[in-house]
Amino acid sequence: MKKKVIILITSILLAVGCLVGGLYAAKIEIVWLRLTLNIICNLLIGLIAYIAIKLSGMKIDFEWKNYKQYLIGILICIILSFCIAWLPALLGYSLVGSKTNFVLWIFFFELLYFFLVIGPVEELFFRVYIQGFFVDLFKKHKWIGVIIASALFGLFHLLGGGWIQVAFTFGFGLVFGFAKQYIKDMHYPGISVCHGLYDFLSYVVRITVL
C-alpha cells in the first residue's frame, strides 16, 4: 500500500505540473504552437495515469465492444448538458463560459480535441486511476472513493477557472464517478464519450445560443 500511495502522490504532482504547463502554453500567441503544446500537456497526463495504473497493478476496463455504455453515456450527457448548458443559455445566462465566434476549423478541432484528448485523458486519470485507487481503499464504502476522486477532479480545475468552476466540476465528477461505479454496463470508453460529448456540447452552446 505504501508503494501505491507514493505512486498516487507522485502522479498527482506530475499531473498538476502538466496542467500548469498547459496554462502557460495557453498564453502563447502562435496558434499552432499553443494548441500543440496544450495537447501534449494533456496527453502527458494520460501517460502519467497509464504508467501509474500499471505500476499499481490496476486494470483499465476497456470494454469498448459493450455498446450499451455509449448509449448510457450519451443519455447522461444530454441530461447534464440540457440542465447545465442549454437551458440556462436559453434563459439568458451562461454557466459554460462566454460567447465564442464560429470558426470552421476550430469547430472540428474542438470536436476531435474533446473526444480524443480531454474525455479519454481526464477519465483515465480521475475515474480509472484515482477513483479506482480510493474505491479499492474503501472497499466497504466505495461511494467514499467516488466522492474523493470527484473532489480532486474539481480541485484540478481550480487553476484554470475558480471556485465556481471547482464546484461545477466536482458535481460532474460525482455524476461520472457514480455512473461508472454503479452502472453495470458503464466502462472507461463509455464515460469518456460522455465526458467528451458534454464538453463539446458546451462549446456548441457558446457559438450558437449565447
Image (tube, rainbow, N blue to C red):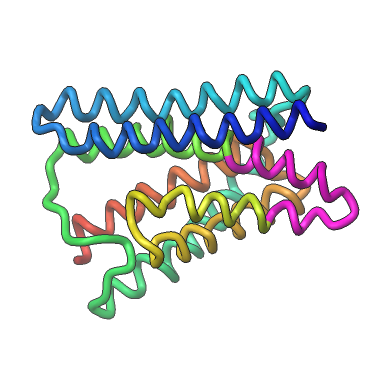
Q: Nearer the viewer, residue 21 or 66?
A: 21
Q: Nearer the viewer, residue 167 or 128?
A: 167
Look at 80% across and 53% down and name the residue there: 142
User: How far across and down, in percent of the image, does residue 67 sit?
Assistant: 65, 37
Q: Quadrant of residue 141?
A: bottom right
Look at 73% across and 39% down and name the residue there: 133
Q: Is residue 89 left or right of residue 149?
A: left
Which residues are drawn in magenta?
126-146
User: How far across and down, in percent of the image, does residue 144 sit?
Assistant: 75, 58
Look at 71% across and 31% down and name the residue there: 61
Q: Is residue 58 left or right of residue 102?
A: right
User: How far across and down, in percent of the image, does residue 208 sit?
Assistant: 20, 59
Instruction: Check if residue 52 falls in the magenta segment.
Output: no
Magenta-drawn stretch, dominant element (helix, strand or loop): helix
User: How far across and down, in percent of the image, does residue 157 sit?
Assistant: 42, 51
Q: Nearer the viewer, residue 142 or 192?
A: 142
Instruction: Check if residue 144 falls in the magenta segment.
Output: yes
